[in-house]
Image: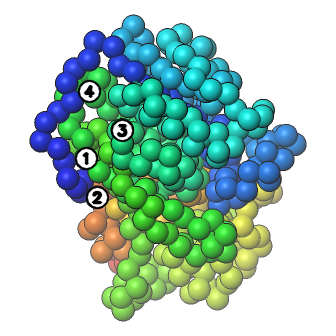
Amino acid sequence: MNPTNISTTAAPERENLLVGLIINPIAGVGGRIGFKGSDDVEAIWAKIEDGEGKKVSNERAMRFLKSIGNLKDTTSFLCFNDEMGEAVLAEMGFNYSIIGKTSNKKPSREDTKKAARLILEKNADLLIFIGGDGTACDVFEAIEDKIPVLAVPSGVKMHSACFALSPEIAGEIFKQFHSGQLNLTEMEVMDIDEEAFRAGRVSAELKGMVKIPYLTASFQGGKMASASTFDEKHDQRVIAERVSDDMDRDTLYLLGSGTTCKVVADYLKLEKTLLGIDAIFNRKLIAMDLNEKQLLDLLKQYSNSKIIITVIGNQGFIFGRGNQQFSPAVIRKIGKKNIILIATVSKLEKTERLRVDTGDIELDKELHGFIRVVTSYHEDILMRIEK
Protein backbone atom coordinates (compact mmCIF):
# COMPACT_ATOMS: atom_id res chain seq x y z
CA MET A 1 0.00 0.00 0.00
CA ASN A 2 1.06 3.59 -0.39
CA PRO A 3 2.06 5.41 2.79
CA THR A 4 0.07 8.41 3.93
CA ASN A 5 1.02 11.67 5.57
CA ILE A 6 4.80 11.39 5.16
CA SER A 7 6.54 14.11 7.16
CA THR A 8 8.71 16.48 5.16
CA THR A 9 11.67 16.52 7.55
CA ALA A 10 13.83 13.51 8.33
CA ALA A 11 14.70 12.72 11.93
CA PRO A 12 18.12 14.11 12.85
CA GLU A 13 21.09 11.80 13.28
CA ARG A 14 21.75 10.92 16.93
CA GLU A 15 25.03 9.88 18.46
CA ASN A 16 23.22 7.48 20.80
CA LEU A 17 19.73 6.17 20.11
CA LEU A 18 17.42 5.24 22.99
CA VAL A 19 15.24 2.36 21.83
CA GLY A 20 12.48 0.39 23.52
CA LEU A 21 12.28 -3.33 22.73
CA ILE A 22 9.26 -5.54 23.36
CA ILE A 23 9.29 -9.23 22.46
CA ASN A 24 6.06 -11.22 22.62
CA PRO A 25 7.52 -14.66 23.41
CA ILE A 26 4.46 -16.58 22.18
CA ALA A 27 3.85 -14.61 18.98
CA GLY A 28 3.73 -16.98 16.02
CA VAL A 29 3.54 -20.17 18.13
CA GLY A 30 0.05 -20.87 16.83
CA GLY A 31 1.10 -20.99 13.17
CA ARG A 32 2.65 -24.43 12.81
CA ILE A 33 0.23 -26.08 15.23
CA GLY A 34 -2.76 -24.99 13.16
CA PHE A 35 -4.10 -22.24 15.42
CA LYS A 36 -5.19 -19.09 13.63
CA GLY A 37 -3.34 -16.84 16.06
CA SER A 38 -1.98 -16.70 19.60
CA ASP A 39 -4.75 -14.81 21.40
CA ASP A 40 -5.75 -17.85 23.46
CA VAL A 41 -2.78 -17.45 25.77
CA GLU A 42 -3.53 -20.40 28.05
CA ALA A 43 -3.92 -22.80 25.15
CA ILE A 44 -0.69 -21.57 23.54
CA TRP A 45 1.33 -21.96 26.75
CA ALA A 46 -0.14 -25.45 27.21
CA LYS A 47 1.04 -26.40 23.71
CA ILE A 48 4.50 -25.02 24.48
CA GLU A 49 4.71 -26.96 27.74
CA ASP A 50 3.73 -30.26 26.13
CA GLY A 51 6.36 -29.75 23.43
CA GLU A 52 4.00 -29.27 20.50
CA GLY A 53 4.25 -25.50 20.30
CA LYS A 54 7.56 -23.94 19.27
CA LYS A 55 8.56 -20.38 20.11
CA VAL A 56 9.76 -18.34 17.14
CA SER A 57 9.91 -14.69 18.24
CA ASN A 58 13.25 -15.04 20.05
CA GLU A 59 14.90 -16.29 16.85
CA ARG A 60 13.30 -13.42 14.92
CA ALA A 61 14.61 -10.93 17.46
CA MET A 62 18.11 -12.39 17.16
CA ARG A 63 18.00 -12.10 13.38
CA PHE A 64 17.04 -8.44 13.70
CA LEU A 65 19.73 -7.68 16.29
CA LYS A 66 22.39 -9.51 14.28
CA SER A 67 21.62 -7.25 11.32
CA ILE A 68 22.32 -4.10 13.40
CA GLY A 69 25.37 -5.44 15.22
CA ASN A 70 27.55 -2.58 14.00
CA LEU A 71 25.41 -0.13 16.01
CA LYS A 72 25.96 -1.71 19.44
CA ASP A 73 28.05 1.20 20.69
CA THR A 74 25.54 3.84 19.65
CA THR A 75 22.27 2.18 20.70
CA SER A 76 20.85 1.75 24.19
CA PHE A 77 17.81 -0.45 24.71
CA LEU A 78 15.03 -0.28 27.27
CA CYS A 79 13.32 -3.59 27.95
CA PHE A 80 11.52 -5.89 30.36
CA ASN A 81 13.17 -8.90 31.95
CA ASP A 82 13.76 -12.39 30.61
CA GLU A 83 11.99 -13.36 27.38
CA MET A 84 10.45 -9.95 26.77
CA GLY A 85 13.83 -8.48 25.83
CA GLU A 86 16.58 -8.94 28.42
CA ALA A 87 17.61 -12.48 27.47
CA VAL A 88 18.20 -11.88 23.78
CA LEU A 89 19.85 -8.47 24.28
CA ALA A 90 22.27 -9.99 26.77
CA GLU A 91 23.03 -12.92 24.46
CA MET A 92 23.70 -10.60 21.52
CA GLY A 93 25.88 -8.23 23.57
CA PHE A 94 23.80 -5.03 23.35
CA ASN A 95 23.59 -2.27 25.97
CA TYR A 96 20.27 -2.34 27.80
CA SER A 97 18.42 -1.26 30.92
CA ILE A 98 15.62 -3.27 32.50
CA ILE A 99 12.73 -0.88 33.16
CA GLY A 100 10.21 -3.41 34.48
CA LYS A 101 9.40 -7.03 35.13
CA THR A 102 6.65 -9.33 33.97
CA SER A 103 3.85 -10.22 36.37
CA ASN A 104 4.83 -13.91 36.21
CA LYS A 105 6.92 -16.32 34.14
CA LYS A 106 4.35 -16.24 31.33
CA PRO A 107 4.27 -12.69 29.94
CA SER A 108 0.80 -11.35 29.15
CA ARG A 109 -0.77 -8.70 26.96
CA GLU A 110 -0.88 -6.45 30.03
CA ASP A 111 2.89 -6.79 30.32
CA THR A 112 3.23 -5.64 26.70
CA LYS A 113 1.07 -2.59 27.38
CA LYS A 114 2.91 -1.80 30.59
CA ALA A 115 6.28 -2.05 28.84
CA ALA A 116 5.12 0.21 26.02
CA ARG A 117 3.87 2.86 28.45
CA LEU A 118 7.15 2.83 30.39
CA ILE A 119 9.16 3.10 27.16
CA LEU A 120 7.07 6.16 26.28
CA GLU A 121 7.67 7.67 29.71
CA LYS A 122 11.43 7.19 29.26
CA ASN A 123 11.28 9.34 26.10
CA ALA A 124 12.64 6.62 23.82
CA ASP A 125 13.36 7.64 20.24
CA LEU A 126 11.81 4.46 18.83
CA LEU A 127 9.84 1.43 20.04
CA ILE A 128 10.60 -1.90 18.36
CA PHE A 129 8.30 -4.85 18.90
CA ILE A 130 8.48 -8.45 17.74
CA GLY A 131 5.03 -9.99 17.31
CA GLY A 132 1.89 -10.05 15.19
CA ASP A 133 -1.37 -8.11 14.93
CA GLY A 134 -2.27 -8.77 18.56
CA THR A 135 1.01 -7.29 19.77
CA ALA A 136 0.59 -4.33 17.40
CA CYS A 137 -2.87 -3.63 18.86
CA ASP A 138 -1.54 -3.82 22.43
CA VAL A 139 1.32 -1.43 21.63
CA PHE A 140 -1.04 1.01 19.91
CA GLU A 141 -3.47 0.91 22.85
CA ALA A 142 -0.63 1.91 25.17
CA ILE A 143 1.16 4.61 23.18
CA GLU A 144 -1.03 5.42 20.16
CA ASP A 145 1.12 7.50 17.78
CA LYS A 146 3.20 9.33 20.39
CA ILE A 147 6.54 7.76 19.34
CA PRO A 148 7.61 5.93 16.14
CA VAL A 149 7.43 2.14 16.11
CA LEU A 150 9.20 -0.53 14.09
CA ALA A 151 7.31 -3.83 13.82
CA VAL A 152 9.34 -7.01 13.25
CA PRO A 153 7.06 -9.79 11.91
CA SER A 154 6.69 -12.85 14.12
CA GLY A 155 2.96 -13.54 14.29
CA VAL A 156 0.33 -15.74 12.72
CA LYS A 157 -2.09 -12.93 11.92
CA MET A 158 -0.27 -10.04 10.24
CA HIS A 159 -2.88 -8.00 8.39
CA SER A 160 -1.54 -4.69 9.70
CA ALA A 161 0.42 -2.59 7.24
CA CYS A 162 3.09 -1.51 9.72
CA PHE A 163 5.22 -4.69 9.62
CA ALA A 164 8.62 -4.75 7.97
CA LEU A 165 8.96 -7.54 5.40
CA SER A 166 11.50 -9.49 7.45
CA PRO A 167 13.79 -9.10 10.49
CA GLU A 168 16.71 -8.26 8.20
CA ILE A 169 14.77 -5.56 6.36
CA ALA A 170 13.67 -4.20 9.74
CA GLY A 171 17.39 -3.97 10.53
CA GLU A 172 18.02 -1.94 7.39
CA ILE A 173 15.15 0.40 8.32
CA PHE A 174 16.61 0.82 11.80
CA LYS A 175 20.09 1.63 10.49
CA GLN A 176 18.77 4.34 8.19
CA PHE A 177 16.53 5.74 10.94
CA HIS A 178 19.54 5.81 13.27
CA SER A 179 21.50 7.88 10.75
CA GLY A 180 18.63 10.32 10.31
CA GLN A 181 17.87 9.38 6.70
CA LEU A 182 14.21 8.40 7.03
CA ASN A 183 11.01 10.40 7.22
CA LEU A 184 8.04 9.27 9.28
CA THR A 185 4.73 8.14 7.87
CA GLU A 186 1.56 6.56 9.23
CA MET A 187 0.49 2.95 8.75
CA GLU A 188 -2.56 0.99 9.86
CA VAL A 189 -2.87 -1.34 12.83
CA MET A 190 -5.67 -3.84 12.23
CA ASP A 191 -7.66 -5.55 14.98
CA ILE A 192 -8.56 -9.09 13.89
CA ASP A 193 -11.39 -11.05 15.50
CA GLU A 194 -9.58 -14.32 16.17
CA GLU A 195 -12.74 -16.31 16.98
CA ALA A 196 -14.20 -15.33 13.61
CA PHE A 197 -10.79 -16.02 12.03
CA ARG A 198 -10.76 -19.57 13.43
CA ALA A 199 -14.26 -20.06 12.04
CA GLY A 200 -13.02 -19.12 8.58
CA ARG A 201 -14.16 -15.49 8.49
CA VAL A 202 -11.83 -12.51 8.28
CA SER A 203 -13.34 -9.78 10.45
CA ALA A 204 -10.99 -6.85 10.75
CA GLU A 205 -11.33 -3.27 11.83
CA LEU A 206 -8.93 -0.38 11.93
CA LYS A 207 -7.48 -0.07 15.42
CA GLY A 208 -5.54 3.07 14.62
CA MET A 209 -2.51 4.55 12.91
CA VAL A 210 1.07 4.35 14.15
CA LYS A 211 4.07 6.37 13.07
CA ILE A 212 6.85 4.40 11.40
CA PRO A 213 10.20 5.29 9.84
CA TYR A 214 9.44 4.77 6.17
CA LEU A 215 11.76 3.05 3.72
CA THR A 216 10.44 2.37 0.22
CA ALA A 217 9.41 -1.25 -0.52
CA SER A 218 10.27 -2.40 3.00
CA PHE A 219 6.82 -2.78 4.55
CA GLN A 220 4.28 -5.42 3.70
CA GLY A 221 1.21 -3.19 3.39
CA GLY A 222 -2.29 -4.32 4.29
CA LYS A 223 -3.80 -7.58 3.12
CA MET A 224 -6.14 -7.22 0.14
CA ALA A 225 -9.11 -9.57 0.15
CA SER A 226 -10.10 -11.26 -3.10
CA ALA A 227 -12.71 -9.29 -4.98
CA SER A 228 -16.24 -10.72 -5.03
CA THR A 229 -17.09 -9.48 -8.53
CA PHE A 230 -18.57 -11.77 -11.17
CA ASP A 231 -15.37 -11.60 -13.26
CA GLU A 232 -13.17 -12.51 -10.28
CA LYS A 233 -15.37 -15.46 -9.33
CA HIS A 234 -15.41 -16.62 -12.95
CA ASP A 235 -11.62 -16.41 -13.17
CA GLN A 236 -11.25 -18.35 -9.92
CA ARG A 237 -13.53 -21.09 -11.24
CA VAL A 238 -11.56 -21.34 -14.50
CA ILE A 239 -8.36 -21.73 -12.45
CA ALA A 240 -10.07 -24.41 -10.37
CA GLU A 241 -11.08 -26.30 -13.51
CA ARG A 242 -7.49 -26.14 -14.76
CA VAL A 243 -6.09 -27.40 -11.44
CA SER A 244 -8.65 -30.20 -11.33
CA ASP A 245 -7.91 -31.36 -14.86
CA ASP A 246 -4.15 -31.29 -14.20
CA MET A 247 -4.33 -33.41 -11.05
CA ASP A 248 -2.26 -36.60 -11.19
CA ARG A 249 -3.51 -39.90 -9.86
CA ASP A 250 -1.93 -41.34 -6.73
CA THR A 251 -0.59 -37.94 -5.72
CA LEU A 252 -1.27 -36.19 -2.43
CA TYR A 253 -2.40 -32.57 -2.87
CA LEU A 254 -2.16 -30.19 0.08
CA LEU A 255 -4.62 -27.38 -0.54
CA GLY A 256 -3.66 -24.10 1.10
CA SER A 257 -5.77 -21.38 2.68
CA GLY A 258 -7.71 -18.57 1.04
CA THR A 259 -10.74 -18.05 -1.16
CA THR A 260 -8.99 -18.96 -4.42
CA CYS A 261 -7.95 -22.34 -2.99
CA LYS A 262 -11.44 -22.85 -1.61
CA VAL A 263 -12.87 -22.50 -5.12
CA VAL A 264 -10.69 -25.47 -6.14
CA ALA A 265 -12.32 -27.56 -3.41
CA ASP A 266 -15.76 -26.28 -4.40
CA TYR A 267 -15.14 -27.32 -8.00
CA LEU A 268 -14.18 -30.81 -6.80
CA LYS A 269 -17.31 -30.79 -4.59
CA LEU A 270 -15.19 -31.20 -1.49
CA GLU A 271 -15.38 -29.51 1.88
CA LYS A 272 -12.65 -26.94 2.65
CA THR A 273 -11.41 -25.05 5.68
CA LEU A 274 -11.04 -21.49 4.40
CA LEU A 275 -8.03 -20.70 6.59
CA GLY A 276 -6.59 -24.18 7.03
CA ILE A 277 -4.59 -26.75 5.07
CA ASP A 278 -6.56 -29.73 3.70
CA ALA A 279 -5.41 -32.94 1.99
CA ILE A 280 -6.80 -34.45 -1.22
CA PHE A 281 -5.89 -37.81 -2.76
CA ASN A 282 -7.45 -39.08 -6.00
CA ARG A 283 -10.03 -36.29 -5.80
CA LYS A 284 -11.19 -37.30 -2.33
CA LEU A 285 -10.80 -35.30 0.84
CA ILE A 286 -8.72 -37.34 3.30
CA ALA A 287 -7.90 -34.81 6.05
CA MET A 288 -8.80 -31.27 7.08
CA ASP A 289 -7.20 -28.35 8.93
CA LEU A 290 -3.80 -30.00 9.28
CA ASN A 291 -0.97 -28.69 11.43
CA GLU A 292 2.75 -29.10 10.73
CA LYS A 293 3.10 -32.42 12.56
CA GLN A 294 0.05 -33.89 10.83
CA LEU A 295 1.36 -32.75 7.45
CA LEU A 296 4.74 -34.37 8.06
CA ASP A 297 3.07 -37.61 9.22
CA LEU A 298 0.91 -37.62 6.10
CA LEU A 299 3.90 -37.03 3.82
CA LYS A 300 5.51 -40.20 5.18
CA GLN A 301 2.57 -42.18 3.79
CA TYR A 302 2.59 -40.83 0.22
CA SER A 303 5.50 -40.95 -2.20
CA ASN A 304 4.16 -38.20 -4.47
CA SER A 305 2.90 -34.89 -3.09
CA LYS A 306 2.22 -31.32 -4.20
CA ILE A 307 1.17 -28.03 -2.64
CA ILE A 308 -1.57 -25.85 -4.12
CA ILE A 309 -1.28 -22.33 -2.77
CA THR A 310 -2.33 -18.80 -3.62
CA VAL A 311 -0.93 -15.30 -3.15
CA ILE A 312 -1.90 -12.84 -0.42
CA GLY A 313 -3.17 -9.93 -2.45
CA ASN A 314 -1.12 -6.71 -2.28
CA GLN A 315 1.40 -8.19 0.21
CA GLY A 316 2.56 -10.86 -2.26
CA PHE A 317 3.43 -13.50 0.34
CA ILE A 318 2.95 -17.14 -0.60
CA PHE A 319 4.55 -18.63 2.53
CA GLY A 320 4.90 -17.22 6.03
CA ARG A 321 1.72 -15.21 6.49
CA GLY A 322 -1.21 -17.18 7.91
CA ASN A 323 -0.07 -20.55 6.54
CA GLN A 324 2.90 -21.41 8.77
CA GLN A 325 1.68 -25.02 8.83
CA PHE A 326 3.68 -25.16 5.59
CA SER A 327 6.85 -25.11 7.66
CA PRO A 328 10.39 -25.32 6.23
CA ALA A 329 10.37 -29.07 6.94
CA VAL A 330 7.13 -29.54 4.99
CA ILE A 331 8.23 -27.37 2.06
CA ARG A 332 11.61 -29.11 1.80
CA LYS A 333 9.92 -32.51 1.88
CA ILE A 334 7.64 -31.59 -1.02
CA GLY A 335 10.16 -29.56 -3.04
CA LYS A 336 9.95 -26.30 -4.97
CA LYS A 337 9.09 -28.03 -8.26
CA ASN A 338 5.91 -29.42 -6.67
CA ILE A 339 4.47 -26.05 -5.61
CA ILE A 340 1.44 -25.06 -7.69
CA LEU A 341 0.78 -21.33 -7.35
CA ILE A 342 -2.62 -20.01 -8.41
CA ALA A 343 -3.97 -16.44 -8.60
CA THR A 344 -6.27 -14.38 -10.77
CA VAL A 345 -4.82 -11.75 -13.05
CA SER A 346 -6.71 -8.99 -11.21
CA LYS A 347 -5.06 -10.02 -7.92
CA LEU A 348 -1.61 -10.07 -9.51
CA GLU A 349 -2.16 -6.63 -11.03
CA LYS A 350 -2.35 -5.28 -7.47
CA THR A 351 0.64 -7.32 -6.28
CA GLU A 352 4.02 -5.84 -7.17
CA ARG A 353 6.16 -8.86 -6.25
CA LEU A 354 6.03 -12.32 -4.70
CA ARG A 355 7.64 -12.96 -1.32
CA VAL A 356 8.34 -15.78 1.13
CA ASP A 357 9.11 -15.63 4.85
CA THR A 358 9.31 -19.26 5.98
CA GLY A 359 11.46 -18.60 9.04
CA ASP A 360 14.39 -20.41 7.40
CA ILE A 361 16.71 -17.94 5.68
CA GLU A 362 18.40 -20.58 3.52
CA LEU A 363 15.07 -21.99 2.35
CA ASP A 364 13.87 -18.49 1.50
CA LYS A 365 16.96 -18.09 -0.71
CA GLU A 366 16.26 -21.44 -2.40
CA LEU A 367 12.70 -20.34 -3.16
CA HIS A 368 13.77 -17.02 -4.65
CA GLY A 369 13.61 -16.88 -8.44
CA PHE A 370 10.97 -17.42 -11.09
CA ILE A 371 7.83 -19.44 -10.44
CA ARG A 372 4.92 -20.20 -12.73
CA VAL A 373 1.56 -18.80 -11.62
CA VAL A 374 -1.61 -20.44 -12.97
CA THR A 375 -3.95 -17.57 -13.92
CA SER A 376 -6.43 -19.24 -16.30
CA TYR A 377 -7.11 -22.52 -18.11
CA HIS A 378 -4.62 -21.91 -20.90
CA GLU A 379 -2.52 -19.17 -19.31
CA ASP A 380 0.38 -19.07 -16.88
CA ILE A 381 2.48 -16.08 -15.85
CA LEU A 382 6.12 -16.22 -14.78
CA MET A 383 6.76 -14.11 -11.69
CA ARG A 384 9.83 -13.74 -9.50
CA ILE A 385 9.88 -14.54 -5.80
CA GLU A 386 12.04 -11.75 -4.43
CA LYS A 387 13.71 -10.80 -1.15
* Labels 1, 4: front one: 1
**What distance separates the C-alpha of mark 4 from that of mark 2?**
21 Å
Question: Can see residue 308?
Answer: no
Name which of mark 2 and mark 3 comes first in the sequence: 2
Binning the other alpha carbons within 10 Å of mark 3 as few (below 14), some (14 to 19) or many (20 upward) gives some
Q: Identify the residue at the far front of this view.
A: 121
Q: Position of residue 116 (x, y in %)?
A: 51, 37
Name which of mark 4 and mark 2 comes first in the sequence: 2
Q: Which residue is mark 2?
A: 1
* Labels 2, 1: front one: 1
Q: Secondary structure at mark 1?
A: strand
Q: Secondary structure at mark 3?
A: loop
* Labels 3, 1: front one: 3
- Kindly indicate the quadrant of the structure image that contains residue 50: top right
Q: Which residue is mark 3?
A: 147
Does the CB distance between marks 2 and 3 fall below 8 Å?
no
46 shown above or below 107: below
Name which of mark 1 and mark 4 comes first in the sequence: 4
Q: Amino acid at mark 4?
A: Gln
19 shown above or below 27: above
Left or right of residue 300: residue 191: left
Residue drawn at (39%, 21%), measured in percent from left and top? 18
Binning the other alpha carbons within 10 Å of mark 1 as few (below 14), some (14 to 19) or many (20 upward) gives many
**What distance separates the C-alpha of mark 2 from that of mark 3?**
22 Å
